């Protein structure tokens, strides 16, 4: 216990300086339009290259960032960096990519984040609808008036709002009604056996119908196999993400990958 607390404290100390030392990086995982067989955007994912120790798993440091509030400055940097990157891709001729970034509830507590988002969009000259902010359902259980006001303000800027890990948090459908949501990201939990378990297939069908009826995009997360892809398409899903298409990539690799159709060739029998 003491050892663990010590490790945590030292991780915290190191994390506090990681941003200034340039140890934080973003990876970009393709978002795939399976109908057009085309990459329509990326989810930016944070990585920490800890001095002398290589990449630290996000699960080890993300909770510390969130608990200590370090996520506030880091979260601003993530939006700035992601927008700068999309500007680079845009200048390379890819003019309609969306960029999704993950947001923690603490970032929505004041108005600082809203100003940071506005500044990042202006600096990189991006149309606000290109930026997607992803929030998890569980993050939304603290849905104070302040959180809702921030989301409304961001949405009013033209930024898109996406509910991450949809279906496994508290599955409170009131969020879908109350918040300015544009996209649902179906949790990989429902995707992993969608081609084998009729219960999962039924749930995916229902969520897909709800999304379509409400005019929301549904992105299926965690697609790892051809069987899952085929089953999802059969059930009406179009937008997807997962290792079957690509893992989170370095920025240069992502740009190179844009030249290739993201759906792997089906192997002949
Ligand atoms: O909660 P969120 O959906 O933002 O999580 C993104 C995380 O999921 C990233 O760390 C990413 O590496 C991981 N991930 C991306 N694609 C897949 C996949 O196909 N399978 C699994 N198990 N994890 C994935
Ligand atoms: Mn996400």
Image (spheres, rainbow, N blue to C red):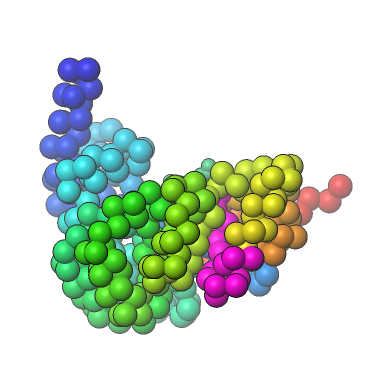
231, 137: nearer the viewer: 137
Q: Quadrant of residue 217?
A: bottom right
Q: Is residue 2 above or below residue 266?
A: above
Report x, y in % for residue 3.
20, 18
Answer with left or right where residue 17 lies relative to residue 226. Answer: left
Q: Residue at x 30, y 80 (%)?
A: 157
* Residue 26 relative to residue 191: left or right: left
77 lies above or below 2: below
- Residue 60 is covered by the magenta coloring: no
Q: Among all residues in the image, which is located at the extreme right? A: 269
Judge from the rendering whether residue 3 lies leftward or rightward of residue 201; answer left or right.
left
- Point out residue 132 in the picture as x, y percentages from the top left corner: 39, 68
Examine the rendered structure and indicate whether residue 200 appears above or below residue 33: above
Residue at point 57% right, 57% down?
Answer: 220
Magenta segment: 209-222
Check residue 221 for magenta coloring. yes
């Amino acid at each position: 216990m003491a050892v663990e607390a010590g490790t945590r404290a030292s991780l915290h100390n190191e994390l506090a300086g990681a941003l200034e030392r340039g140890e934080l990086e973003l990876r970009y995982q393709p978002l795939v339009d399976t109908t057009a067989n085309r990459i329509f955007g990326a989810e930016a994912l944070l990585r920490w290259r800890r001095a002398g120790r290589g990449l630290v798993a996000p699960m080890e440091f993300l909770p510390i960032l969130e608990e200590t509030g370090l996520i506030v400055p880091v979260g601003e940097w993530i939006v700035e960096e992601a927008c700068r990157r999309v500007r680079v891709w845009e200048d390379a001729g890819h003019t309609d990519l969306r960029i999704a970034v993950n947001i923690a509830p603490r970032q929505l507590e004041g108005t600082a984040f809203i100003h940071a988002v506005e500044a990042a969009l202006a600096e990189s000259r991006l149309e606000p609808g290109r930026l997607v902010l992803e929030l998890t359902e569980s993050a939304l259980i603290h849905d104070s008036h302040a959180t809702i006001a921030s989301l409304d303000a961001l949405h009013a800027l033209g930024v898109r709002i996406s509910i991450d890990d949809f279906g496994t948090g508290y599955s409170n459908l009131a969020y879908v009604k109350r918040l300015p949501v544009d996209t649902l990201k179906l949790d990989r939990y429902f995707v992993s056996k969608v081609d084998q378990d009729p219960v999962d297939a039924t749930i995916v069908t229902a969520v897909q119908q709800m999304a379509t009826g409400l005019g929301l995009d549904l992105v299926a997360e965690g697609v790892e196999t051809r069987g899952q892809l085929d089953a999802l398409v059969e059930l009406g899903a179009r937008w997807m993400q997962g290792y079957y298409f690509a893992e989170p990539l370095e920025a240069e690799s992502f740009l190179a990958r844009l030249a290739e159709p993201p759906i792997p060739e089906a192997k002949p029998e």
